[in-house]
Image: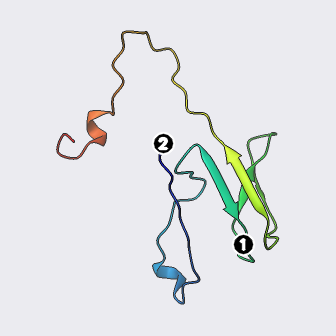
């Protein structure tokens, strides 16, 4: 089991910040401890639209994702697509 953490302190020059891309979770369980920073959205159940979440300092928001494989036979070998690998690795 892996635990990935991200902490984004205030950057004086936001144009040079690096972080996770939008709507991206790095693991199957995501916890977000909110401060006054805006930018959290959740996917709605109707029309798959994204809904803005007002930041409430000290709120802990969480989501659970379940990765799954669909329609693979038991003798299938599952691996990354060759074009997604760099130098065959």
The residue lying at 73 percent from left, 42 percent from top is 48
Label placed on residue 3: none
Quarter in which the C terminus is drawn: top left
Q: Position of residue 7 (x, y in %)?
A: 55, 70
Q: Which is nearer the N-term, disc 1 or disc 2?
A: 2
What is the x, y in percent for residue 88? 18, 40
Check disc 2: other Cα within 10 Å, few if <14, some if 14-19, many if 20+: few
As drawn, is 51 to the left or to the right of 21? right
- Which of the 4 image quarters holds residue 84? top left
Q: Residue furthest bottom?
A: 12
Residue drawn 59% across and 83% down?
10
Distance of label 1 from label 2 (alpha carbons): 30 Å
Q: Is residue 76 left or right of residue 9?
A: left
Query: Which residue sits at x=32%, y=33%?
Result: 81
Q: Residue at point 73% right, 69% down?
A: 34
Q: Is residue 48 above or below residue 21?
A: above
Q: Is residue 49 left or right of residue 14?
A: right
Q: Secondary structure at mark 2?
A: loop
Question: Disc 1 or disc 2, which is closer to the eye?
Answer: 2
Identify the coloring. rainbow
Query: What residue does disc 2 label?
Result: 1
- Left/right of residue 52 with respect to residue 13 in the rendered view: right
Give neighbour class at mark 1: few <14, some 14-19, many 20+ (Cα, 10 Å).
few
- Which numbered dot is residue 38? 1
Residue 29 at x, y = what percent? 62, 46
**Do tag 1 and tag 2 residues touch (Cβ < 8 Å)?**
no
As drawn, 69 above or below 26:
above
The kind of secondary structure element at disc 1 is: loop
Residue 27's x, y, as percent? 54, 47
The image quadrant that residue 59 belongs to is bottom right
> Furthest residue to the front?
1
């Amino acid at each position: 089991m892996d635990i990935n953490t991200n902490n984004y302190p205030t950057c004086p020059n936001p144009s040079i910040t690096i972080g996770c891309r939008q709507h991206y979770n790095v693991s199957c369980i995501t916890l977000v401890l909110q401060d006054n920073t805006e930018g959290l959205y959740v996917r709605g159940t109707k029309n798959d639209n994204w809904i803005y979440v007002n930041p409430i300092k000290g709120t802990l928001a969480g989501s659970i994702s379940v990765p799954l494989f669909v329609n693979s036979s038991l003798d299938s070998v599952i691996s990354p697509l060759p074009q997604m690998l760099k130098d065959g690795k």
